[in-house]
Each structure stands twice: as structure tokens, then as C-alpha cells.
Image (cartoon, rainbow, N blue to C red):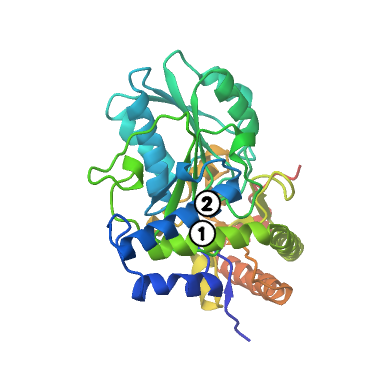
């Protein structure tokens, strides 16, 4: 019997009931602009400051006033990167990043390159992990920013951000960490990372869309990239989305309180799903780091050989299973992720790629349904594939490494 199972939690999550309830008054009763001087404006401003305190506490930041609210994680990433290099261009015009960044990071840097800045993109290994020594080797005399992610948005691989942070500190270079996919699911302390800038997306840990968060260390230099008013202490112009910011503050507080239980639960389901898939399906591989301490506990990026991801995605949807075939920022163009190219994955395996991302509300029964359904989907698609026939006849070999 068809069930509805949501396994696209790294793209977005539903808001918690308490988040929804916390937001409602700020739509209907306390609707004042936080920049206004009247009572309703002051009330809204106090609500923003309370959320700053909640976010600061969740990431180990000392000063709530260092929290900057934006419209989304993409804007936070743009502000961190462009705002940094524009503020620091008197010192240099070079950026160090990796070949496996989120489109909002990669495209921000590509934009800057068109305007006279330079970037070195450090390679990653076959698991998608960057070597800190390679980051250090890429630093030049005029390097002003090192930008990377905590956990990869496609393959879940966790980067050695603390080691990179030590390099950045030693070399006196501003360090930005994209934590949009990590916050709420991985231990996050800005001081241990030695970061200067960190971005978060509440809608990935049961908060609302419409708000992004950028933490800026007091020492970090940053200028606004949106021209307008003096909101967010001149760091981000534009009227703040008070309901979403209030909801995000509640969501991050709940994520901190429930962190151990949530992560243990999703890690168990992640393992159950992967073990079930590989026991039922031949010629399937896990992309990214092995399950465990070097991988995000929600993410399974899987390639089934001899079939394409689009067909899998459509049949999963028909079976009531919501999954993705790459970052939600790029998946609609039906091209496989550049991250898969960066780890050296064969093109045919990249085209047969799906991402299953579990959440706190998923159950073992749902995972078992997904395993059974997905095995049937792969069998059905391979039954229509001449390439699968050639493999069965021994005409071609599998490209999946057996080591």
C-alpha cells in the first residue's frame, strides 16, 4: 500500500508546532516594523534581540549583537563572501575555497572573479574531503578569505573546519564556514572553528523559510551588499522578517535541546536505510564519506548503476517517497551535481544519483517501506535498460569500485 514518506529533509523541514504558534502573534497582533520608534516597533525589536540571543547561545557566540538576520541562507552566504572581500580589498583580492561548494558560495565567488578578484579552488578526495595542507598551500600573499562548508550539501561529507580555522588564524585570514546544512545536526561552536563568519538556515532544522542567519566575529570585516536603510546595524538593509526570525529563534533553541536525541535517531535510520538498500540492490554505491563521524547523519547520497536519477526520482514520487537528485538550488535543471564530478565519480553513476535525507519524524517502518519500494523501482527501470542487459550478459563491467 502506498505511503507518503518525506526523505528530503536537507532541502527543507516542516516547522515545529511550537515554532508556528510562536510566529502567529507577529503576523496578527505585533506587526510593527522593528525600526519604528513606537511601542509596536520596540516590541518587534525586542523580539529580534531575543532571537539573536537564542542563535548566539546555540553556536557558542559570546555576543548576540554579532548575529545578522538575512532573507535566507543563500543571502547570508552572499553577504559573507562579497561583504568580506569588498571590505578587505585594500589588503588583497584572492580567495581560497574548494571545488565542492554550494552554488550560493561558488556562484558568489565566480561573480567576484568577473570583477577582478581571483580564487583558488582546492581539490577534494574521493570522499569529498579537503586536505587542510592543500588549503594552506593555496594561500597567497594577497589572500583575504578562506571559504568552505562544514558538511557538504550533496554528499554529507564533514570537512576538517577546525584544522582549517587554525590555518586561517595563524595566517591572519578571514575564515567563512557555510553551516546551512550543518546547523541543528552537527556540533557547532564558532570559537572551536576559529571562524570569522558562519551562516545558518533555520528551515533545515524545523524553522521557517524566509530567514537566514550570519554570525560575524567582532574582529571580522564586513560591508553591506544591499543598499538601503540602517537595519541590522548597517550590515544588511531591508525590513526584518520578524515572524520568521522569531520562529527561527524557537527552532534553534529546540534543536539545541533535542540535539542528542535527534542525531541518534536519524543516524540509526540512515544506517538502516543504507544497509537495506545495499542488501537488496546490486551495483549500488554510497557517494561521500562512509557512515559515521565524517558524514552528516541525515544524508545518504546513492548511485544505482545502469539507470538515471530522473526516472528514479519520478517513480519514487509516484510511490509517495519524496527524495532529491541534488541540491534543491540546482536540481530542476536535471544536471548532476558538480560535487559528484569533484569526487571523481563516473558520469554514468552521477546520472544515477539520488539523495535520501532523513529527519527526526521518520520511522523505522517508513524506512522499510522505502527500501522495499526503491528496490522495486530500480528493478523496474533496469528491466527497461539495454545497458543492464549488457551487464547481465557480461558484455560490460560495473564501474563501482569493490574496495
Residue 256 lies, in percent from the top left, at 64, 56
Say which residue label 1 marks: 249
Q: Nearer the viewer, residue 180 or 223?
A: 223
Say which residue label 2 marks: 53
Going 56% across and 45% down the picture, which residue do you hit?
152
Residue 241 seen from this side: no
Check disc 2 and report its element: helix, strand or loop.
helix
- In the visual, does 189 lie left or right of 51? right
Mark toward the start of the polypeptide (1 vs 2): 2
- In the visual, does 98 lie left or right of 372? left
Going 64% across and 73% down the picture, which residue do you hit?
376
- In the visual, does 22 lie left or right of 379? left
Check disc 1 and report its element: helix, strand or loop.
helix
Residue 94 lies, in percent from the top left, at 40, 22
Local crowd size for mark 2, using a 10 Å CA cut-off: few (<14), some (14–19), many (≥20): many
- Gap between marks 1 and 2, in whole Å? 8 Å
Residue 83 seen from this side: yes
Q: Nearer the viewer, residue 28 or 383?
A: 28
Amino acid at each position: 500500500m502506498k505511503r507518503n514518506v518525506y526523505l528530503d529533509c536537507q532541502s527543507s523541514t516542516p516547522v515545529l508546532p511550537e515554532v508556528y504558534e510562536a510566529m502567529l502573534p507577529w503576523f496578527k497582533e505585533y506587526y510593527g516594523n522593528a525600526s519604528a520608534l513606537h511601542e509596536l516597533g520596540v516590541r518587534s525589536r525586542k523580539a529580534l534581540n531575543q532571537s539573536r540571543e537564542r542563535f548566539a547561545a546555540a553556536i557558542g557566540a559570546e555576543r548576540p549583537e554579532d548575529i545578522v538576520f538575512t532573507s535566507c541562507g543563500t543571502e547570508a552566504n552572499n553577504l559573507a563572501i562579497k561583504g568580506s572581500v569588498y571590505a578587505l580589498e585594500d589588503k588583497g583580492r584572492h580567495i581560497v575555497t574548494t571545488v565542492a561548494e554550494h552554488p550560493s558560495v561558488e556562484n558568489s565567488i565566480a561573480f567576484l572573479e568577473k570583477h577582478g578578484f581571483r580564487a583558488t579552488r582546492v581539490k577534494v578526495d574521493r570522499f569529498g574531503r579537503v586536505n587542510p595542507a592543500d588549503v594552506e598551500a593555496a594561500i597567497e600573499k594577497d589572500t583575504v578569505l578562506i571559504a568552505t562548508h562544514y558538511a557538504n550539501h550533496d554528499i554529507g561529507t564533514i570537512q576538517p573546519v577546525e584544522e582549517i580555522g587554525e590555518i586561517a588564524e595563524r595566517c591572519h585570514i578571514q575564515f567563512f564556514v557555510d553551516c546551512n546544512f550543518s546547523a541543528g545536526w552537527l556540533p557547532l561552536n564558532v570559537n572551536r572553528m576559529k571562524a570569522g563568519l558562519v551562516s545558518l538556515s533555520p528551515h533545515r532544522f524545523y524553522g521557517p523559510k524566509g530567514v537566514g542567519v550570519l554570525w560575524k566575529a567582532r574582529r571580522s570585516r564586513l560591508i553591506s551588499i544591499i543598499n538601503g536603510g540602517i537595519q541590522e546595524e548597517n550590515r544588511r538593509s531591508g525590513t526584518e522578517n520578524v515572524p520568521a526570525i522569531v520562529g527561527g529563534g524557537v527552532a534553534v533553541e529546540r534543536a539545541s535541546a533535542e540535539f542528542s536525541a535527534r542525531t541518534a535517531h536519524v543516524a540509526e535510520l540512515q544506517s538502516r536505510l543504507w544497509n537495506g538498500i545495499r542488501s537488496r540492490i546490486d551495483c549500488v554505491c554510497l557517494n561521500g564519506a562512509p557512515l559515521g563521524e565524517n558524514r552528516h547523519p541525515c544524508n545518504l547520497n546513492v548511485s544505482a548503476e545502469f539507470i538515471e536519477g530522473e526516472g528514479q526520482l519520478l517513480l519514487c514520487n509516484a510511490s509517495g517517497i519524496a527524495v532529491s537528485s541534488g541540491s534543491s538550488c540546482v536540481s530542476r535543471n536535471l544536471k548532476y551535481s558538480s560535487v559528484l564530478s569533484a569526487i571523481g565519480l563516473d558520469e554514468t553513476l552521477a546520472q544515477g544519483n539520488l539523495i535520501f535525507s532523513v529527519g527526526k519524524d521518520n520511522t523505522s517502518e517508513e524506512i522499510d517501506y522505502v527500501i522495499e519500494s526503491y528496490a522495486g523501482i530500480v528493478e523496474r527501470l533496469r528491466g527497461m535498460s539495454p545497458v543492464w542487459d549488457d551487464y547481465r550478459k557480461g558484455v560490460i563491467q560495473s564501474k563501482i569500485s569493490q574496495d
